[in-house]
């Protein structure tokens, strides 16, 4: 029994020694004598074509990573390792990183929130603001966001820019002061931030001081500080 164990140990020792010799002596010698080739440049080449081109010189292309890239088209090689023009042994594996294309994002719905909040959201999801426009709104107060261009829920690429549309404030429309006494008309217009400029008195039937004509006309859009002229009964 002891003799059998000794023989078994000798056999195992020779087996291990053979493996070590093959790995560290024989294989390096064989590889060292292999033909050298120059690595072609397959960056920004479609993966299928890149693999064919590498095989044509005796190399093996292997995809090790896929990632988003704003510049390199989807399916094309972003990076290769070894680099182009390197001299390597024939049969060498070339590691390839392939583009998934630009990452797409849905434009968020920002209507009604402040500029600061909108800016924070836009930056957080990887978009930019290229321009800010301001217009009056029927329903959204001054300084709040009305919308964006492209509009909410549109698919865009990460890093794309948006036009942000802010509210200058609620639209002011010229009230109808015809039929009001001049003093009442002045009060109405002052509350809207408007000013009565020229007051023309004319002969007419009706109560003295009653407004019978106005400019701008009722319903016209006006801004704070605009001047209105009226015609009243003398």
Image: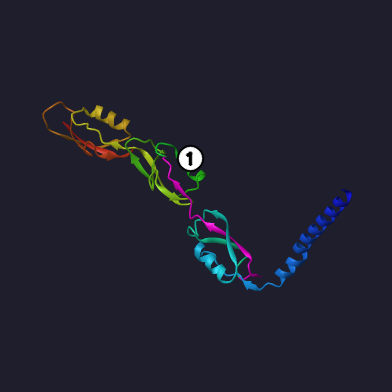
What residue do we see at 59% from left, 62% from top? 80
- Residue 37 part of the magenta segment: no
Q: Where is 54 relative to 174, above or below? A: below
What colour scheme governs how the chains and residues are painted in the rendered image of this protein?
rainbow
Q: Which residue is mark 1?
A: 116
Left or right of 56, for residue 178 = left
Q: Where is 119 relative to 54, above or below? A: above
Location of the C terminus (image quadrant): top left
Q: Residue furthest top?
A: 207
| Towards the viewer: 220 or 126 | 126
Count of picture labels? 1
| Towards the viewer: 75 or 4 | 4
Residue 82 pos. (x, y %): 63, 65
Residue 79 pos. (x, y %): 57, 61
Residue 147 visible in the shown view: yes
Left or right of 79, for residue 189 = left
What range is drawn magenta here?
85-109
Left or right of 165, for residue 172 = left
Q: How would you rate the neighbour count of disc 1 (Cα within 10 Å): few for under 14, some for 14-19, many for 20 or more? A: few
What residue do we see at 48% from left, 41% from top? 121
Q: Secondary structure at mark 1?
A: helix
Q: Where is 206 relative to 9, above or below? A: above
Residue 153 pos. (x, y %): 40, 43
What residue do we see at 81% from left, 55% from top? 12
Residue 193 pos. (x, y %): 33, 34
Examine the image and state in which quarter residue 152 appears. top left
């Amino acid at each position: 029994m002891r003799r059998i164990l000794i023989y078994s140990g000798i056999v195992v020792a020779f087996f291990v020694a053979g493996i070590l010799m093959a790995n560290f002596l024989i294989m390096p010698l064989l590889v060292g004598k292999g033909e050298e080739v120059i690595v072609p440049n397959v960056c920004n080449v479609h993966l299928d074509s890149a693999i064919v081109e590498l095989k044509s010189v005796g190399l093996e292309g292997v995809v090790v990573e896929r990632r988003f890239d704003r510049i390199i088209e989807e399916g094309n090689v972003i990076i290769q390792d070894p680099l182009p023009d390197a001299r390597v042994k024939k049969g060498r594996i070339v590691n390839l990183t392939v583009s998934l294309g630009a990452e797409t994002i849905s434009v968020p719905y920002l209507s009604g929130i402040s500029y600061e909040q909108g800016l924070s959201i836009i930056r957080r999801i990887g978009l930019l603001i290229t321009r800010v426009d301001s217009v009056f709104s029927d329903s959204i107060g001054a300084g709040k966001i009305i919308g964006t261009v492209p509009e909410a829920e549109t698919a865009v690429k990460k890093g794309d820019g948006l036009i942000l549309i802010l509210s200058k404030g609620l639209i002011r429309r010229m009230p109808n002061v015809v039929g009001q006494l001049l003093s009442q008309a002045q009060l109405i217009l002052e509350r809207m931030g408007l000013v009565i400029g020229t007051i023309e008195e004319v002969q007419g039937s009706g109560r003295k001081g009653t407004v019978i004509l106005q400019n701008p006309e009722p319903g016209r859009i006006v801004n704070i500080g605009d001047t209105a002229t009226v015609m009243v009964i003398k």
